Image (cartoon, rainbow, N blue to C red):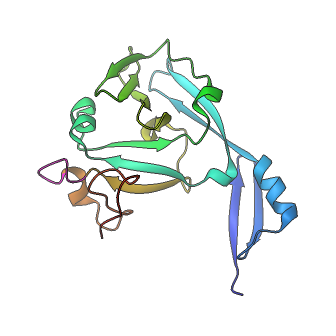
Amino acid sequence: MKSSTQRISTGELHLEALVTARVPREWRAFLAMATITLRAQCHCKESSFTFAVPSTSFPLSCGLCSCSSCRFATGQLAASFAVIPLDPAALKLDVTKPSSYASSDHRTRYFCATCGANVLDFDRSDGMWRACTGALDRTQGLLERNLIFIEDTKDGGLTVWMNGVGKRFAGSPDHEGYRV
């Protein structure tokens, strides 16, 4: 059986774990309890959200989205969001400070009323919160980046500069296979 060493980072705690086809039972319990705390915060720090994510949930699913809604709501060629893999009801995010904008019938974007930075996004179609990756305090090694909704833009958007980055999805990765 081939094995390799993988570094698992849980905030201040760093572990060297021998990764094989099966994680030893004593490690599974520890990994299930370990969390990584992330903060999504705007530029002026008026809108700040902190959440602890189980280390077993990493890397977080992250979409570099080129859909028309993301493109025109942000003024950028693509928007980047990471799914917060926690029960939305358990998150208890206080979204009374940031301003909100329903950019579609299923998506509400939250941004700072002072500095304008996008911070959070809620998708009613799957009931999940997403953090804007540019607002996260750290991302290195924590995100699985994929290019999504690339066919929604007629000119390729940001994807024309992103060769070799993640998988490419014509639409949502939840509803189709990826394109090479």
Residue at 55%, 38% in the rendered image: 137
x, y percentage for residue 141?
55, 57
Residue at 29%, 66% in the rendered image: 163
Q: Which residues are magenta?
A: 150-156
Image-based side of 90 in relation to 84, left or right: right
Is residue 29 within the magenta segment? no
Residue at 28%, 28% in the rendered image: 104
Residue at 35%, 21% in the rendered image: 116
Q: Is residue 11 above or below residue 50?
A: below
Residue sticking out furthest to the left: 154
x, y percentage for residue 1?
72, 87
Quadrant hosting residue 89: top right
x, y percentage for residue 7?
69, 64
Residue sticking out furthest to the bottom: 1
Q: Is residue 9 above or below residue 53?
A: below
Tally of numbered tags: 0
Q: Is residue 114 above or below residue 118?
A: above
